[in-house]
Image (spheres, rainbow, N blue to C red):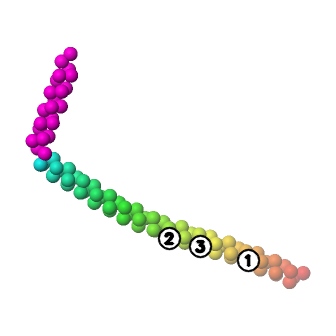
Amino acid sequence: MALPFVVGLAIGAGVVVAFNKIGSLKETLGFGVDKTKELAACGLEKSKDVAADLKETVGATVACIKEKKTAKKMAKSTEIEIEKEEE
């Protein structure tokens, strides 16, 4: 039956300690928030760089595939022309 009383007392004591050390808590939390913002900005820049590199790579791959298809079509048409000339 005394458990709610003890829990309330512990929470109250925690609030009083936190209120007494509010300056150092703000400083610590402010540093953490600033560091988090810095890391988020850095991560955003890195992800933009990776996305740009990926876009270039995919574009180059698509161009290579198109060149191979075109070369294959040209080779087939050349074979057909050679066969017609032989006949």
Left or right: 50 in relation to 84: left
Instruction: Mark 1 or mark 2: name the one nearer the start of the chain.
Output: 2
Q: Quarter of the image holding residue 43?
A: bottom left
Amino acid at pointer 3? Ala
Type of secondary structure dominating the magenta stretch:
helix
Left or right: 41 in relation to 58: left
Which mark, residue 75? 1
Q: Which residue is mark 2?
A: 56
How far across and how far down the image is residue 54, in percent? 48, 66
- For this rendering, which residue is in front, 62 or 23? 23
How far across and how far down the image is residue 77, in percent? 77, 77
Amino acid at pointer 2? Glu
Q: Which residue is mark 3?
A: 63
* Number of disc labels: 3
SS class of the residue under badge 3?
Answer: helix
Q: Are marks 2 and 3 in contact (CB under 8 Å)?
A: no
Q: State which mark lies toward you, 1 or 2.
A: 2
Part of the protein shown in magenta: 1-22
How far across and how far down the image is residue 70, in percent? 68, 75
Mark 2 closeness class: few <14, some 14–19, many ≥20 residues within 10 Å: few
Q: Quarter of the image holding residue 85?
A: bottom right
Instruction: Mark 1 or mark 3: name the one nearer the start of the chain.
Output: 3
Which mark, residue 37? none
SS class of the residue under badge 2?
Answer: helix
